[in-house]
Image (cartoon, helix red, strand yellow):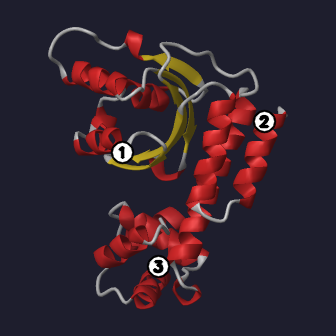
Amino acid sequence: MDGTVRSLIDMLEAAQDEDMIKAALKSFAQAYGYDRFAYLQTEGPEIRTFNSYPEPWEGIYLTSHYSRIDPVVTEAKRRRDIFSWTADNWPARGASDLRRFRDEAVEHGICSGVTIPVEGSFGSTMMLTFASSERTLDVPPALDSKTALQVVLAVHYRLKMIAASTAISPKRMLSPRETLCVLWATKGKGAHETAVLTGINARTVQHYLDRAREKFDARTIPQLVFMAKERGLL
């Protein structure tokens, strides 16, 4: 494994907070000539992001729901391997939303990059992008498919662990079975449907959901789901 990649993996493993993760990714990006990074997780219409993009661009991106038309996100969902991209290949004429997206991205220094997509659980897609203000940059030779996958998973799980450890007290940690049942509840599945999907008895599923509600002082399942998401558990 390339020394720069090895250093990134080690720094991610040692990270104690999000600032340390951000510093590790910034250092890696700059080592290969990129200006910024963006980790994005999509699940249906919902997105979660962790990035070093300019704050004005992040605000525009989220409020305009650009993830729905972003060519990089579209391509990441279509393929499951690392790829490079450039804004030069996006529509440059007309008055479409995609043209406006391109112009605003370029204006904020997002002109080219490389993206690593990974298929996540429950139909989600995770992707890590390194972006540049240059018109084009090649994929770093150190990032072969296997290594790129390892990097994305390292970022994903470190962010998840830090969110869980800082936002949830030990008494409110859900067991693996409770978490599984709550996850299916986020998909709109009731106790009987979850029982079929998991092989757990329906009454036991309801018991896990009730116990999870008690841990979070939630009156209803929707409230439980909301609180668990807010605390970074799901």
Query: Left of 92 or right of it: where is 108?
Result: right
One can see residue 200 in this view: no
Helix, strand or loop under label 1: helix
Q: CA distance from mark 3 to mark 1?
A: 42 Å
Query: Which residue, given by chain and number where applicable, does mark 2 sit on?
Result: 4
The residue wearing badge 1 is 55
Give residue 197's position: percent from left, percent from top.
49, 62
**Disc 2/disc 1 C-alpha distance (Å):** 27 Å
Q: Determine the image quadrant of residue 71.
A: top left
Amino acid type assigned to the residue bearing label 1 in the image = Glu
Sequence-first disc among 3 and 2: 2
Q: Is residue 78 above or below residue 198?
A: above
Which one is in front, 172 or 189?
A: 172
Q: Which mark is residue 205?
A: 3
Q: Image height check: is 159 above or below 8?
A: below
Task: Find residue 163 and report its horizontal and vertical position in percent.
Answer: 54, 67
